[in-house]
Amino acid sequence: MTLLRPLTPLLTALATAAPLAVDAEPAVAQDHAHSHHHSAPAAGPSRAHGGTHAHGMHEAQSPAPEVRVQIERDAMGGWNLRLATRHFRFSPERVNEPHEPGTGHAHIYVNGTKFARLYGPWFHLPALGAGRHTLRVSLNTNDHREYAHQGRPIEWSAVVEE
């Protein structure tokens, strides 16, 4: 399994427990990583991928953090997510403390609703039910603000179908 790929690879979910194929036709899942490499404005009033900035945003210093996510169907149900970050370190011991550049945690959203807080790179997401579901992972500061670069949240998103 290759973890690091271009920031916006196309993913296709397989019907088995096999990993998602990268650079395949976007038949089932497509992912989008947003980091300091993107310059297009966000769509819609809150963002194209849903969710709000309840705690606000923090403009990251250079080099800005980056996040990419590898997602695979789990043979026992649900999805396994593995986050790969650059210029960012998970710091669960500092949650709710003042901001420290390049550290924090991640939030995972399902269909625009916050599902969980992540303190490390691995996460098992249970089965979501039949249909298409939008997943979004954001990088957050210790004080829960979303990291941003050039006014855009540093995040990854994909649509999966069960």
Image (cartoon, rainbow, N blue to C red):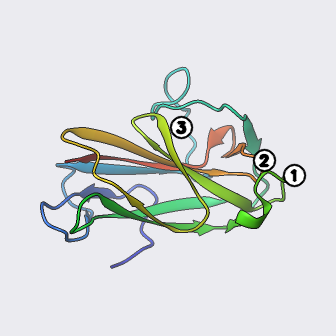
For disc 2, the marked residue is 143
Tell me what residue is drawn at x 84 percent, y 53 percent.
Answer: 99
Residue at 79% across, 55% down: 61
| Mark 2 to mark 1 CA distance (whole Å) | 6 Å
Residue picked out by circle 1: 98
Tell me the kind of residue under disc 3.
Ala
Q: Residue furthest top?
A: 45
Give the vertical position of 113 relative to 22 (above or below): above
Q: Residues within 10 Å of mark 2 (few under 14, many from 20)?
A: some
Between 52 and 44, the residue placed more toward the observer is 52
Viewer-nearest residue: 104 or 97: 97
Q: Give the residue type that dot 1 points to.
A: Pro
Residue 58 on image: x %, y %: 76, 43
Left or right: residue 119 versus residue 43 is right
Query: Which residue is labeled 3 in the image?
Result: 40
How many residues crowd mark 3 within 10 Å: few (<14), some (14–19), many (20+)? few
